[in-house]
């Protein structure tokens, strides 16, 4: 069930980098329990849009609303504190660390040992195991391995688990989550997205694969040359129509 009020809404967002207009007056809304796909050619402004949504960039113009109220996001940690997080294209996973170390990278759990703060590796491992299993249905053969030894899909799960380990996460943004994956790993990642949607998250996925987009999304936001060329319901559109919006041979109804 999709609620009427979006969790988060971007209104009239523009972004300029010097003379480059990366975004021009773009609106976007994300709803609980919904997958919104963002598609568009290279340079269309997809990544910039979601970097603004996750507090990485500040918009030049426009505003963001959270639960219908104006919300100013000064930094990426502001976004995370307010339940918005992202899994990036270049996974930002430290290959030599274990899955648990990656999940808690920069936010390590500690315990007091003889009055000193020490890493609580046992707790981090059990928490990581729990998040992977309960939230994503993923069980690794061993948690005591370097993350680089895992398959692409498992590494993806670790990256996603890092975001969803925050129980108050409400909006998960993914920039090209299947770009570097083979067909089997892609299928697994799409399954993970469906599982998270069922848990009520709002999911925003940037993808170049219209097959993936049609399989998982409820709505499709088409970016073209910095502008939104249209937002269509996946069930009511076709591959051809979306391609037309991407290349500009069609305009939104
Ligand atoms: N940090 C930056 N500095 C300057 N220009 C940028 C920066 N990031 C993006 N751009 C430009 O903004 C436009 C949109 O880029 P981007 O959002 O990465 O597009 P997409 O993700 O759709 O490929 C492009 O013209 C790109 O070159
Ligand atoms: Mg991009």
Image: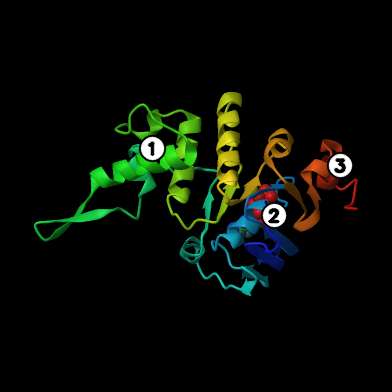
Q: Marks 3/2: CA distance?
A: 20 Å
- Disc nearer the start of the sequence (3/1): 1
- Disc nearer the start of the sequence (3/2): 2
Q: At 71% from the left edge and 60% from the top edge, which residue is drawn?
A: 28
Disc number for residue 45? 2
Please tell me how crowded label 3 is: few (under 14), some (14-19), or many (20+) other residues with Cα within 10 Å: some
Q: Residue 235 vs residue 118: left or right?
A: right
Q: Residue 151 vs residue 99: left or right?
A: right
Mark 1 highlights which residue?
95
Element at label 3: helix
Q: Give residue 116's quadrant in the image.
A: bottom left
Callout in the foreground (3, 2)? 3
Q: Residue 126 vs residue 152: left or right?
A: left
- Disc nearer the start of the sequence (1/2): 2
Q: Residue 63 vs residue 250: left or right?
A: left
Against 75, residue 176 (above or below) is: above
Q: Which of 167 and 81 lies nearest the eye of the viewer?
A: 167
Element at label 1: loop
Q: At 63% from the left edge and 63% from the top edge, which residue is drawn?
A: 8
Contact check, label 1 and label 2, Cβ < 8 Å: no
Which residue reaches farthest left?
114
- Asked if the residue at label 2 sits under 8 Å from ligand 1, the reply is yes
- Asked if the residue at label 1 sits under 8 Å from ligand 2, the reply is no
Please tell me how crowded label 1 is: few (under 14), some (14-19), or many (20+) other residues with Cα within 10 Å: some
Q: Which of 22 and 78 lies nearest the eye of the viewer?
A: 78
- Residue 239 in the image, given as x and y percentages of width and height: 82, 37
Mark 3 highlights which residue?
241
- Asked if the residue at label 3 sits under 8 Å from ligand 1, the reply is no
Which quadrant of the picture is home to ligand 1?
A: bottom right
- Residue 77 in the image, given as x and y percentages of width and height: 46, 63
Q: Marks 1/2: CA distance?
A: 29 Å
Q: At 41% from the left edge and 43% from the top edge, which residue is drawn?
A: 131
């Amino acid at each position: 069930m999709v609620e009427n009020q979006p969790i988060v809404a971007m209104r009239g967002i523009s972004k300029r980098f010097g003379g480059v207009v990366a975004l021009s007056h773009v609106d976007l809304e994300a709803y609980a329990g919904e997958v919104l796909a963002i598609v568009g050619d290279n340079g269309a402004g997809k990544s910039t849009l979601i970097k603004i949504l996750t507090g990485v960039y500040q918009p030049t113009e426009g505003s963001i609303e959270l639960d219908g109220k104006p919300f100013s996001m000064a930094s990426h940690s502001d976004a995370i504190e307010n339940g918005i997080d992202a899994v990036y294209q270049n996974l930002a996973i430290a290959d030599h660390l274990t899955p648990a170390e990656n999940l808690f990278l920069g936010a390590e759990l500690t315990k007091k040992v003889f009055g000193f703060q020490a890493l609580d590796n046992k707790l981090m491992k059990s928490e990581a195991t729990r998040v992977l299993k309960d939230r994503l249905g993923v069980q690794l053969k061993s948690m005591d391995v370097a993350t680089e030894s895992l398959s692409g899909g498992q590494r993806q799960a670790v990256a996603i688990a890092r975001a969803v380990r925050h129980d108050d996460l409400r909006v998960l943004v993914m920039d090209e989550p299947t770009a570097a994956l083979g067909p089997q790993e892609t299928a697994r990642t799409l399954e993970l997205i469906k599982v998270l949607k069922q848990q009520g998250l709002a999911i925003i996925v940037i993808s170049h694969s219209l097959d993936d987009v049609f399989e998982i999304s409820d709505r499709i936001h088409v970016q073209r040359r910095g502008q939104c060329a249209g937002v269509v319901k996946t069930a009511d559109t076709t591959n051809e129509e979306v391609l037309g919006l991407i290349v500009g041979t069609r305009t939104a109804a």
